[in-house]
Amino acid sequence: MFSRLIFTAIFLACSSLATAAPVDLRQAVREAVSARPMSQAARFDAEAAKAAVGQARSRYLPRLTLTENLLWTDEPGGSLFISLNQEDLVLSQDADAYNFPPSRRDFETRLTLDQALYDPDISYGLRRAQTGAAAAEGGARRSGESAAFAAFGAYLDVQRAQTAQGWAESSSRQAAEIYRLAGERQRAGVGLKADTLRAGVQVAEAERRQVAVENDLAIARRALALAMGREGETADIAGPLTPEQFADVPVETLQRGDLQALSLQAREAELAREQSRAAWLPKAGLSASYALHDGEVLFGTEAGGWTVRVGLSWELFDGFSRTHGTARATAAQRAAEARRVEATRQARFEVEQARLRAAEARRSREVALQGLAQAEESQRLLLQRYEAGLSDLAELLSAQSALDRARFDTVNTEAMLILALGNIRYQSGTFVKTLLQPEENNP
């Protein structure tokens, strides 16, 4: 027996050590924004879009290429070309020396510089990349908002489960007390056995409800850890939230990252349309190279020479490809703008809907609190009357059931009110901003 007690104590101690420290809402939100994979993926997408800006800007810079080629031939033109490049041409009065030359080889080492002088694709490509990077940043911010709001909901679920656990334990104690009183009345000969059995059913129902609430709490703690980006852990809350912690947001406030992203995507589509029109313009570029030639070794220096070339190209006809490209870009730009308008209207609707649901939840909480006070008083009076033998068990059990429902409604409506108030901030795009300091908004 003593060894079993020691084992139980060790097990409880290990369990307490394994349990993570409670977290407050700010910490839960901070971890969700920084550590949850969904928000990390969006931030990596934004980083990739920023890198694309540098990649597009690099097209303004020259390209420097080093090549090494081997040319081996006995063709008359190629042999003469090699002789000239290697600066060892020997004139001959005999045409056979040129018509039937021996095979020759040439190792050419060439350093080439290419510089674009005028290319509309470069400027438009850079502007589109910059716009896309800003759009990706807006999408990452909205993803962080979604992760934070999910953690907020999980935090509320733990709070609701903890509160429900409290009233479930209270309900179980009250059901046990009614069962005790019913048993005493039966033993005293003033109560029926059927009443004792009905009270026993009430006790069993309270115990079942208590087990379900405990499971809900365990699941909610795991869900909170998952929403915070933790894997295979549980998390507990440091303290309950209250409706007073969340104030309404002004109607005109709408700072959602997804709307900003859609607006920027529409701008990028407009730039793509302008770029398709600029495809009709000519392009100019410069190319310079220095070459070394040797007939025996790689990277030889037997002879050398340089070349500079400046050119302009203007594609006059391409089979109507640019015409169709402009039509496609125009349609894509209109589609992007339509998506932006639709999302903006939907966002305004969602904010207004969140406000109405918050007002509804506030009224429901007030009604639930009134109902709880009345149910508690009704159960107290009927318990006194039952102890005095002035009422039957059915009335008391009915009052107890009403009290249990009132307790559940109170817990649920309070959590729903807090969630509805937080949803106003989430739908307006200010949820993370109002919970974290400015330096914490972009982890």
Image (cartoon, grey):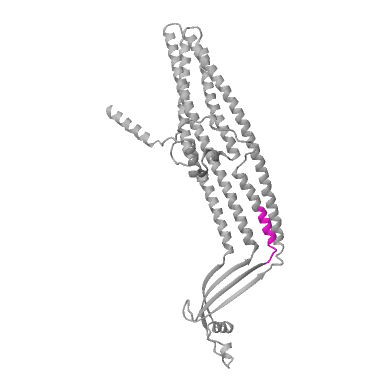
Question: Which image quarter is the N terminus in?
Answer: top left
Which secondary structure is most common in the magenta stretch? helix
Q: Outermost residue, front direction?
A: 438
Q: Is residue 219 left or right of residue 16?
A: right
Q: Which portion, as a residue range, is magenta?
A: 269-282
> Is residue 352 visible to us here?
yes
Residue under the point 42% across and 6% down: 188
Q: Give the image location of residue 136, x and y in percent.
A: 58, 49
Question: What is the quadrant of residue 346 in the picture?
Answer: top right
Judge by depth and name the residue closer to the eye, 267 or 68: 267
Residue under the point 61% across and 53% down: 131
Q: Give the image location of residue 145, x and y in percent.
A: 55, 41
Q: Give the image location of residue 407, x and y in percent.
A: 52, 22
Q: Is residue 55 left or right of residue 330?
A: left
- Residue 424 drawn above or below residue 105: above
> Is residue 208 visible to us here?
no
Residue 280 is a magenta residue: yes
Judge by depth and name the residue closer to the eye, 16 or 424: 424
Residue 155 is a magenta residue: no
Question: What is the quadrant of residue 130 in the picture?
Answer: bottom right
Residue under the point 59% across and 72% down: 287
**Number of marks in the image?**
0
Judge by depth and name the residue closer to the eye, 361 or 57: 57
Q: Outermost residue, left direction?
A: 2
Q: Give the image location of residue 43, x and y in percent.
A: 53, 48
Q: Outermost residue, bottom direction?
A: 93
